[in-house]
Image: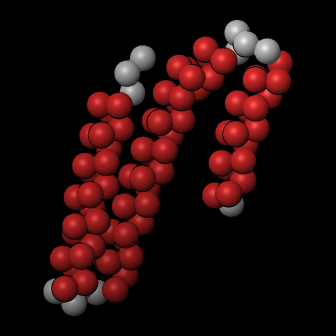
Amino acid sequence: MDFKPNALKRIKIAQGHLNKVEQMLAEDVYCMDVIHQSRAVQAALKKVDEIILHGHLHTCVMQDLHGSRAKNEKAVDEIVELFRKQA
């Protein structure tokens, strides 16, 4: 499963939104419109995270599941910790 092309596509989308935020700020666009565009950046980056996590679960984690219980628990703990940091 090659998730990288889709993740890279989404990164480009996020970059486009971010460039728009920069342009809007430089042009003194209405603040709420800038925030709306900024939220689009955040949503695009969240989608990148989802794509990468999905890829990770279907590649790295699936391979590790054939290993020891300790290795499996480590993989799960790593994912849980990542989401704990985002809260």
Q: In which quarter of the image is residue 2?
A: top left
- The answer to whether 10 appears left or right of 16 in the picture is right
Q: Pinpoint residue 67: horizontal percent, then vertical percent.
A: 73, 13
Q: Residue furthest right?
A: 69
Left or right of 80 in this view: 10: left
In the picture, the quarter occupied by the C terminus is: bottom right
Whole-percent x, y for residue 36 in the image: 37, 71
Farthest residue, direction top: 66
- When the figure is inspected, residue 66 is found, relative to residue 79, above or below; the finding is above
* Residue at 27% over, 73% down: 21
The quarter holding residue 24 reads bottom left
Above or below for 14 versus 7: below
Question: Residue at horizontal 37%, vertical 69%?
Answer: 38
* Image position of 75 (left or right of 4): right
- Which residue is found at the position 30% from the left and 40% from the top? 8
Q: Which colour scheme is used?
A: secondary structure
Q: Position of residue 25 (x, y in %)?
A: 25, 84
- Looking at the rendered image, the quarter that the N terminus falls into is top left
**Foreground residue among 37 and 51:** 51
Residue, x 67% and y 39% (percent of image)? Answer: 79
Residue 27 as seen in the image, left or right of residue 43: left
From the top left corner, tell me how far across and down residue 7 is, in percent. Answer: 36, 38
- Pick whichever, 75 or 17, lies toward us: 75
Residue at the limit of the structure toward the bottom, as seen here: 28
